[in-house]
Image: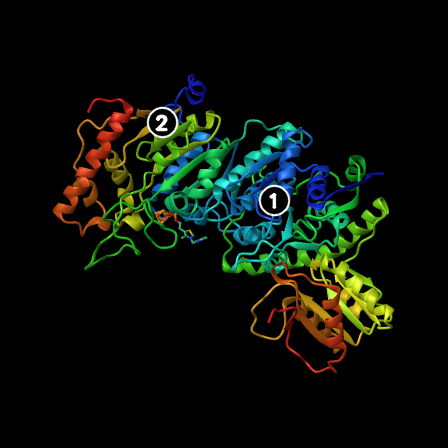
Amino acid sequence: MGKRIGVEVSIAAAEAVALANVDVIAAYPITPQTHIVEHLSELVADGHLDAEFIPVESEHSAMSCCIGSSAAGARTFTATSSQGYALMSEICYIASSMRLPIVMTVANRALSAPISIWNDHADLMMSRDTGWIQTIAENGQEVIDLTFHAFKVAEDHRVLLPVQVNLDGFTLSHMIEPMNMPDKAEVDAYLPPYKPVLRLDPSKPVTFGPVGMPDIYTEAKMAQDQALRNSKAVIIEAWKEFGDKFGRYYKPVETYKTEDAETIIISMGSISETAMTAVDHLRSQGKKVGLARIRLWRPFPGPELFDAVKGAKNLVVLDRAMNFSGGDSGIVAAEVKSILFDQNHHPNVRNFFVGLGGRDVTVQNFEEMVEKASTNGGKPVPYEIINVRE
Amino acid sequence: MGIAAEAIKDFKGFNLKNMPEVEPLSPGHRACQGCGEILALRQAMKALGNNVIVCSSTGCMEIVTSPFPQTAWNVPWIHVAFENTSAVVAGVEAAYKAMNRKGIINQPDVTFLAYGGDGSTADIGIQALSGAMERGHNFIYICLDNEAYMNTGIQRSSSTPWGAATTTSPVGKKSKGQSTWKKDMPGIAVAHNIPYVATASPAFPVDLMNKVKKASMIPGPAYLHFYSPCPTGWRCGGEESVAVARMAVQSKVFPLYEVIDGQYVLSRKVAKPKPVADYLKMQRRFRHLTETDIQMIQERIDADYAELLKKCGVEA
Ligand SMILES: Cc1ncc(C[n+]2csc(CCOP(=O)(O)OP(=O)(O)O)c2C)c(N)n1
Ligand code: SF4
């Protein structure tokens, strides 16, 4: 039945990858992801994990190696953050277009300049349109569980897309938390060996990555889009099976005290734990506040999110990455507004940028945001950056 | 004996009587007439046979062999991007290693080949290539050197020779074409201490194929540099490309040699070299060069060749 452990979340993430019986890991160090691949290399060095560990010379090559490895038919993993993601991004698009079930953990970190090694969601937002399935963990247990789920979904023949598991750098990756680590037999029962549909094999030659002339490119992209859309049902199914086997149930959007809420905060990642404390605090003052947390970011769970927030008068939407649209919405807020628009539902949406480059976000900040949203009176307001020093 | 010498000690070469009939790279591709790259690649593939996985860089050889839904490849082939073919092949090789060891597959004898143009090799992909050679993956890398970025329309690369006119090293009032000397890519490969490095030319197919075959027998990385005329970019006739390639060797412009376990071995000594001017004359990319320019190039070629003979321990 697994065992209760208390370790750093990065170490747990690496242990989960090892339990998933991965064949090839290609990786390059970058803070705050480093502990994950360091620990994986130790597991390989000690013989606890039978895998090829390729210490590549750049993240661009890490993702390229992963493509080669996955195309050859091996279960494949890498991890990165921030600038590392930026360098590999050219190849990330190719990984999803070639329908390769690579799994990557991203310990989320801000993007330069100024150089900042601390957490925000700049890398996550940059990777939003790469065609990868993307999940976001709130705590250590989710990091472990989403890792198994990632391989399960990626390698499903109805999906065959790469999956990115996101966790907040430092504020989650470097925390020591109590977690339940499943045992090998349990993971094996959930996660069958990878069986590629096509692979690079001289006994059955195939061509991967040919030239797409204008008369085929559109169709190829349409098929890829369809695959991402169709993956949602499989993602949910895989969470159901996970729950039935491990007793921990997950869904695309998680809610906390939303049933009668007038004001709902929409968040992603570990910051949601602070948000829940703020919700409790505000509730104790008689304020009807709730939280909706996005766990599945791509494919975007529009209907689920709408269901979660449709009863509220005010929405507090958090963005944790600068996006320089020059307009009046962060990326998360723009997505939220688009689902409201489609349903002709117009609650008061207030968009706040918080926690950029590792800036602390406190319970008090949440209370301030909720207050602003509920006193706004429904007039559109551009986004606001919270906690800016004078 | 070094690992390369050990691996090829029983090597029996190809000759005109035992040419393999396999064509892993089939006819019907879309390369220009007289393309030296496709010729060299075809010869290499004949030498390797069918038990091979090929990783292609972006460039002419990718474009002309793979427009979907057609493919000229009878063996598994993958193209990912321009600068990363060495990293892709490293991933394929590692996957085979892991899967063979874990009993997931039983295919221990597959050969892994990566190729790229000179731009891919000497410029944008040099980092990934260096990384893969340094880590010692068991693969063959072939640089198809046509001395420019041809796929995007004849722009200069660091492998373009001094004085060559390209679309980004044009001849003008203040320019004689390419202003730098050709980067010594085989030398850079040798500096990685890999077991096998060689140069070859499609004008000498038996020599080329034997080098490819040896590379496939040697464990670890092997780097092959193929001189590959491009009639389109060099402004010569398609029917002349093999003659140009032969002249490059005969004029000492492109000497043929191997470096086995770090030991230089001359493949053929050019006893009565033709003048470099004869080589340059065959291609309109050099037509603006003056007598003085050609003299300077001749001196440089002579010096480089003398240096090579020294490394090979051959009397001048
Ligand atoms: C990152 C990136 N930059 C630029 C290009 C455009 N590009 C494609 S092929 C090529 C040149 C290829 O030259 P070379 O490697 O010498 O091969 P050749 O076509 O001459 O065989 C360039 C610049 C690209 N595909 N990717
Ligand atoms: S442009 Fe040159 S290298 Fe490219 S296919 Fe034509 S001849 Fe070959």
Subunit under mark 1: A
Split into 4 quadrants, where in the image is the N terminus of chain B?
A: top left
Q: Is residue A304 left or right of residue A103?
A: right
Q: Amino acid at mark 1?
A: Thr
Disc number for residue A141: none
Q: Where is A335 relative to B61, above or below?
A: below
Q: Which residue is mark 2?
A: B259
**Residue at figure coordinates x 48%, y 37% from the top left:** B132
Give the quadrant of the C terminus of chain B.
top left
Label 1 C-beta lies within 8 Å of the nearest ligand 1 atom: no
Crowdedness of circle 1 by 10 Å Cα count: few (<14), some, many (20+)?
A: some
Which of the two residues, B119 or A288, is positioned nearer the viewer here?
Answer: A288
Q: How many numbered marks, from 0 up? A: 2
Reply above or below: B14 against B175. above
Q: Position of residue A198 (x, y in %)?
A: 62, 42
Q: Residue at x 63, y 67 (%)?
A: A331
